[in-house]
Image (cartoon, rainbow, N blue to C red):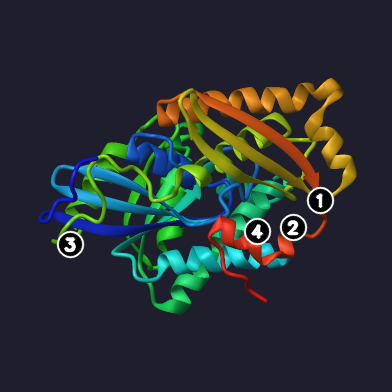
Amino acid sequence: MSETRSHGRCGFVAVIGAPNAGKSSLVNALVGAKVSIVTHKVQTTRARIRGVAIEGGAQIVLIDTPGIFSPRRRLDRAMVAAAWEGFEGADAALLIVDAPAYLAGSGPGGADAAARRAAADTDAIIAALRRRGAKAHLVLNKIDKIARPKLLGLVKTLNEAGIFEQTFLISAQNGDGVADLKAFLAARMPGGPWMYPEDQLSDISERLTASEITREKLYLRLHQELPYEATVETDKWEETNKGVRVEQTIYVARDGQKGIVIGKGGATLKAIGAAARAEIAELIGRPVHLFLTVKVRENWAEEAARYREMGLDIVD
């Protein structure tokens, strides 16, 4: 591993927004590697994950936060609290907005429930930033899916809030506008030593990364069938002369969910395991032997140990 630079520029950038706005996709694009999982399911990111991007002599530490929404459960409250904690003390903040969803959800009728929630959550975040007297940079995402006249109208509407210093139009998925945003952030980083070695892309451990990868494959495979109440923990990480033995437990809330995850004859669990094993092996550069177990734990989202595993604090 390379040494940490003792000079240059380094700072923190909080990436906030409503669930499914594309925060993790943007962090991955800025880092140039996958450090946060991405699924179609909202509220996929549960903990603060730091991705490390380098641009010239600047190190940009990106804080990928959980989506900010109206919390109902204890886990929801913990995730929203983590998002706002990631915002505090950052050298710059990006508010990511799913432009097509916001336009659909804030317009007159016809929008689906998800778009209406996305627009309402974004409006609530903007209101919260105004109450805090905070400034941010507006990043409109998924611009490739919206006509330019409508996009420019949205830029004007959102900037009426008076809290945005700069506006960027990007597509995190195809890379449009990402390089300009990265250069802008690099120029804003304060002078000082780098926080991480040059070859380190994230601050989360291999164990937690492995859990996140398996959780991603779980949701990608069972996006419609499996509710949000599922998590993955890495119970064992053992280095051997043949690679790494990884044992993980998938926790679900009800017996019926266990059967969904396992699938007929174990086929679904086998497919999830194969996809996760391949990505973990590629990430660490060593063969991986992955063993998955599915357990029912009805109140896992209320247990302190589960919160510690995700790097969250319990919020009552």
Which residue is labeled 3 in the image? 190
Mark 3: which amino acid? Pro
What is the quadrant of the C terminus in the image?
bottom right
Determine which residue is flagged by label 1: 253
Q: Which residue is depicted at the point 37% across and 32% down?
A: 175
The amino acid on which the numbered mark 2 sits, given as a three-letter code, is Trp
Q: Which residue occupies the foreground of this view, 42 or 50? A: 50
Disc 4 marks which residue? 306
> Do the CB atoms of the residues marked 2 and 1 lie less than 8 Å apart?
yes
The front one of 171 and 198 is 198
Among the two numbered marks 2 and 1 on one chain, the one whose residue lies closer to the N terminus? 1
Marks 4/2: CA–CA distance:
7 Å
Q: Position of residue 274 (x, y in %)?
A: 62, 22
Q: Hey, what amino acid is under mark 1?
A: Ala
Q: Earlier in the sequence, mark 3 or mark 4?
A: 3
Between the C-alphas of marks 1 and 3, the distance is 45 Å
Q: In the rendered image, which residue does mark 2 sit on?
A: 300
Q: CB atoms at circles 4 and 2 under 8 Å apart?
A: yes
